[in-house]
Amino acid sequence: MFFNLSGRRPDVRVAADARRRFRAWRRGRPFWAGLFTLAASLPIVYFPYVHLTVAGVPLALSTTAGAGALIIGILLMVLGITLWFQQQVRVFAGIAALLLTLVSFPVANFGGLFLGLFSGLIGGSLACAWAPPTGNAEPPNRGSAAVPVGEGQGDK
């Protein structure tokens, strides 16, 4: 009643199929670059607008550049999503993410207290380094072994 003919529950099969489709989708694009870039935007946007309390002492990080931090954070969000859905612009998006992250260092409280800075640098670097997968990659031929020069040629 709870199992089908294959012995697995239908919801497990659906979850396995969804995981397989997500894995295929993720492998065809710079997923981790987009995720790191998107994650970099969150502390950059968050910290200029929040008032923290450390050991009972209020710590206000709001500066006059709050609008700059908001713009940089939103642009990093857009670049992260762009990396997922428009792989053709990965180099442009990577370089733009690197430049925006470096600009966030003086503008947005040390790049979101270094959390956004390091995440954005990693995401931009991954975006620039990513190459699309090739569909016709063949495994190496193990039947023919290369013979080093000078060996196997007999004594002459």
Image (cartoon, rainbow, N blue to C red):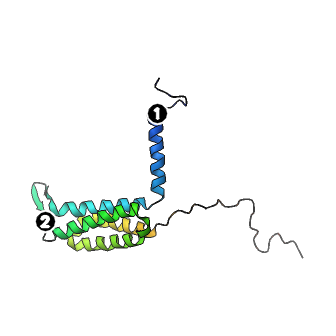
Amino acid on which disc 2 is placed: Ser
Q: Residue furthest top?
A: 1
Kindly identify which residue carries mark 2: 62
Identified at 74% across, 67% down, the residue is 146
Pick the residue in front: 100 or 90: 90
Pick the residue in front: 71 or 143: 71
Q: Quadrant of residue 51?
A: bottom left
Query: How many numbered callouts?
Result: 2
Q: Residue furthest bottom?
A: 156
Identified at 46% across, 33% down, the residue is 10
Q: Badge 2: how crowded within 10 Å, few (<14), some, or many (20+)?
A: some
Location of residue 39 in the rendering, given as x and y in whole percent from the top left corner? 31, 59
Amino acid on which disc 1 is placed: Pro
**CA distance for labels 1 and 2:** 51 Å
Q: Quadrant of residue 140?
A: bottom right
Question: What SS does tag 2 mark?
Answer: loop
Location of residue 20 in the rendering, given as x and y in whole percent from the top left corner? 48, 47
**Above-or-below relation of 25 to 79:** above
Give the label, 1 or 2, closer to the camera. 1
For residue 140, side relative to residue 125 (left or right): right
Query: Mark on residue 10?
Result: 1
Mark 1 or mark 2, earlier in chain: 1
Question: What SS does tag 1 mark?
Answer: helix
